[in-house]
Amino acid sequence: MKKTTQFRELLHSHELEFLCEAHNALSARIAEEAGFKGIWASGLTISAALGVRDSNEASWTQILEVWEFMSDATKIPMMVDADTGYGNFNNVRRLVQKLEQRGVAAVCIEDKIFPKTNSFLENGQEDLADIDEFCGKIRAAKDAQSDPDFCVIARTEAFIAGLGLDEAMKRAEAYRLAGADAILIHSKISKPDEVLAFKKVWGERLPVVIVPTKYYTTPTDVFREAGFSMIIWANMILRSSIKAMKETAMQLKSEQSLHNIEDRIAPLSEVFRLQNAEELAEAEDRYLPVSEKNPVRAIILAASRGEEFGALTMTKPKAMLDIGGKPILFRQIDTLRDIGINDITVVRGFGKERITASGIRFINNDDFASTREVTSLSVAVDELPASSEKTLIVYGDLLYKKIIPSLLLEAKGDFVIAIDPNWKERGCRDRYTDYVSTKEPYRKTIFDKTVPVNALGPDLVQKDITGEWFGFLAISPNGFSILRTVLAELKDSKSFASMRMSDLFRELMSRGHTISAVYITGHWLDFDEIADLSAVGTF
């Protein structure tokens, strides 16, 4: 259905309909995804987004460019706020032609003097246009349209100017006779008395649109029962974004770090999704030469039950423990997808039937009860093809922030592990811990630098310990080939089933392969005992 037809049906719907403000293509797409059937391209918010006042300081052609991007980005109809029409009847005629060319469904023009001032400005100029002159604009707009469903909404500012109900009725009736498709009646008092009085006298002559910005406390059912056609939520998307941007900017200025910001804001993957990057990728597959490049991938080792959690893991594995309404594993998957890793394999074991997720590859370690994590890794390596990009290996009982996998993906080396230098603060001596000794102890200037590992395991002498490995490993394509060969050779050994990852690392080092480390200070949380669940809120 054409956008113009969609809008006309909304205008004449038997239900109260709603338009949501948007001020650029991104916010328009967000409004559409929220479920709105139509968009209000607000003059106030577009002007604000451009950094100018709502007083026709941006030219109509500059605003037209914004409308074009908004229309292209969405499939739902859009009504544009065209202020006073940007001139006389002749300007309005050309405006309507340009709007139709860009797929705009409707235009709203108001009966003020050019240049206009915003209706809610204190001590603003509220001179209204001559009725006959404004009626000429309406007739010109209707004569200029080529699509019979294109709508012209006449907005009267009689209440804004303090001229009362009689003047509002006089103007609205004149605009109806001039050919307007609907009347937008505006008011800036904190109660809906003026618009309700207007609708009562006006009846059903034409659909009536309202903008309850100032009388926002009124229940929506009041407007529904009064018979209004359409409500515009006029500036809330911009105002909410201003609040969020100010808070983020202040935090960035105060903390001079992204660490506490990154996981509280929309991931870049969401920006790319809203930009429809997926469509471009599909088009590249159709039109560009075939590439041999495979995407970065992740393997999550989640085969263990987690007996230390007692009754909590009697029927479901530790990776499926609920953390704030979502299992640990699902939170891991979300974090990986947020940084663009969509090729994810999960190795299941205990309670495998309880681990399901869309778009995820599952591999089973049916010997989970008598084996350790190296066996789980081995069954995954056996089934997965070689890769031209990195492979991330991560334990299934971790929560972590995006900085960790991001740093590992950038690090160079066949085998790179993430280690935390603050191992003493965790009291790790009370439980099995993979301690690490590197050739270069942690200092702030090497936070993103890889350092060679000298030794690792639970029995390192305390003075040699420089960090703790907590379950994150990045493997290069060459490293993956090495790993496959080494695992195949180790399978026949009696100790294979009991091998931990630190045992595998030591085996690789004994064969002359380098294990490198990247220091990560915090930003992760593992679950080794019930007490760890209490740390989730702080994390």
Image: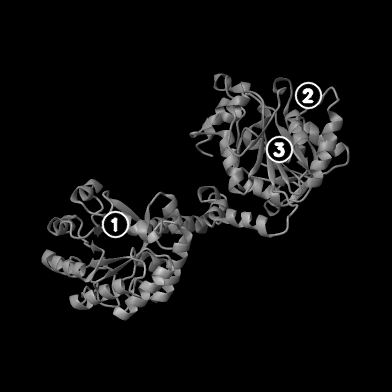
| Residue displayed at 65% across by 40% down | 344
Residue 193: image location, x then y, percent: 15, 56
What colouring style does the render use? one colour
Quick check: 418 above or below 497? below
Using the image as rendered, state which of residue 263 and residue 437 is in the foreground. Answer: 263
Residue 457 seen by the camera: no
Viewer-nearest of labels 3 and 2? 2
Q: Which residue is mark 2?
A: 497
Instruction: Please tell me whether mark 1 or mark 3 is closer to you in this view.
Output: 1
Residue at image location 44% in from the left, 68% down from the top: 102
Tell me if label 1 and label 3 are in contact, CB under 8 Å.
no
Mark 1 or 3, nearer chain start = 1
The kind of residue on which mark 3 rests is Trp
Residue drawn at 25 percent across, 54 percent down: 229
Q: Earlier in the sequence, mark 2 or mark 1?
A: 1
**Where is mark 3, residue-wise?**
469
Between residues 89 and 270, which one lies in front from this camera angle? Answer: 89
Q: Position of residue 416 (x, y in %)?
A: 75, 44
Name, please, the residue furthest toward the right.
511
Of callouts 3 and 2, which one flags the residue occurring earlier in the amino acid sequence?
3
Q: Is residue 96 visible?
A: yes
Residue 512 occupies which quadrant of the picture?
top right
C-alpha distance separating marks 3 and 2: 21 Å
What residue is disc 1 on? 11
Name the spot of residue 341 as percent of width and height, x first: 64, 46
Q: Amino acid at mark 2?
A: Ala
